[in-house]
Amino acid sequence: MNQTAMAADALELDYSIEFELFDVLNKLIEHTQPTDYTGSRPPQRSYEDEISGLDLFAFVVEIERFSQPVYYKFSISQDAFWLVSLHENREYK
């Protein structure tokens, strides 16, 4: 995954990847509804080496931690949750 982009997005959202990422993800997942899905149908497939061929799921969700809606995209393999993107919903601006 693109760690530089993830770090830049974390700075933009003003959260610590090291100390807050799991709490942020937990809140996002808790508040995500099927109607929050913004990905394509059927889902796009990843071309990243680590998750090549896996479905990508994208959502826009509002949680109290952030002042604007947040876009996040992930993939799930048999044994892992792969966060691909987490940033402000850029369509919101």
Image: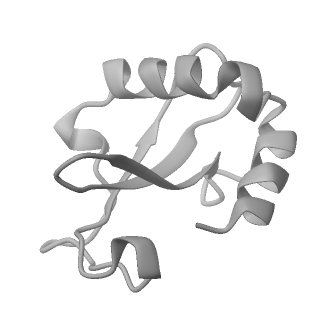
Q: Quadrant of the N terminus?
A: bottom right
Q: Quadrant of residue 26?
A: top left
Residue found 78% across the figure and 28% down from its top = 15
Where 71 sits versus 23, above or below? below
Color style of the picture: one colour
Q: Position of residue 83 (x, y in %)?
A: 48, 51
Q: Residue at x 66, y 16 (%)?
A: 65
Closest to the observer: 85 or 68? 85
Depth order, front residue of 88/86:
86
Q: Quadrant of residue 57?
A: bottom left
Residue shown at 24% from the left, 31% from the top? 33
Q: In percent of the image, x 55 and y 17: which residue is there?
A: 23
Q: Quadrant of residue 10?
A: top right
User: How many numbered tags mark residues here?
Assistant: 0
In front: 50, or 46? 50
Residue 68 percent across, percent down from the top left: 66, 33
- Asked if 16 appears above or below 57 in the picture, the reply is above
Pick out the residue farthest to the bottom.
47
Residue 37 location (% of width, % of height)? 28, 50
Q: Is residue 11 left or right of residue 76?
A: right
Left or right: residue 70 versus residue 48 is right
Asked whether 27 or 89 is in front, the reply is 27
Q: Is residue 43 left or right of residue 4?
A: left
* Residue at the farthest front position: 79
Q: In this rendering, is residue 76 above or below 69?
A: below
